[in-house]
Image (cartoon, rainbow, N blue to C red):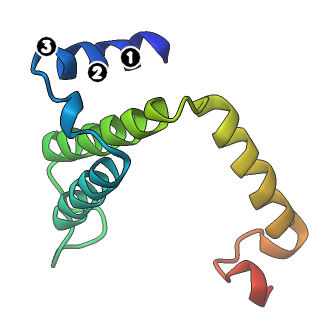
Amino acid sequence: MTTLINEIIKFRNERDWEQFHNSKDLAVALSVEASELLELFLWKENEDFNIDKLKEELADVLMYALLLANKHDLDIHEIILDKIRKNAEKYPVDKSRGNATKYNEL
């Protein structure tokens, strides 16, 4: 993961874009890219999308998420595992297996 983040940072720094990468703008860019990802599915069947466009938009979302985490020295591995642990408490297997109900309604 470190090598990947380093490649993203190298790309950004070669273009002198770090000046634009404050927390707010990274979060906004992440949201915009997530919306572009959603647009691939608009007015289509569930699995009817262009896989190449999916790769591009998903890469954009992931890059902005990684840049935001890196900006705040967050360990991606650690924060994801922490979130999985929290979700495991909110969604115990015996109540949530095969069920899409929100945790507060289980």
State the CA–CA distance, disc 1 to disc 2: 6 Å
- The numbered dot on residue 14 is 3
Circle 2 residue: 8
State the CA–CA distance, disc 3 to disc 2: 10 Å
State the CA–CA distance, disc 1 to disc 3: 16 Å
- Name the spot of residue 83 as percent of width and height, x first: 70, 51
- The numbered dot on residue 4 is 1
Left or right placement of residue 64 versus residue 98 in this view: left
Which amino acid, mark 3?
Glu
The residue tagged with tag 3: helix, strand or loop?
helix
Choose top left, top right, bottom left or bottom right for residue 5. top left
**Residue drawn at x 23%, y 57% as measured from the top left:** 37
The residue tagged with tag 1: helix, strand or loop?
helix
Q: Residue furthest left?
A: 15
- Name the spot of residue 48 as percent of width and height, x first: 20, 62
Q: Residue furthest bottom?
A: 105
- Closest to the camera, between mark 3 and mark 2, is 3
On-image quarter of the C terminus: bottom right
- Name the spot of residue 30 as percent of width and height, x first: 30, 52
Front residue of 96/65: it is 65
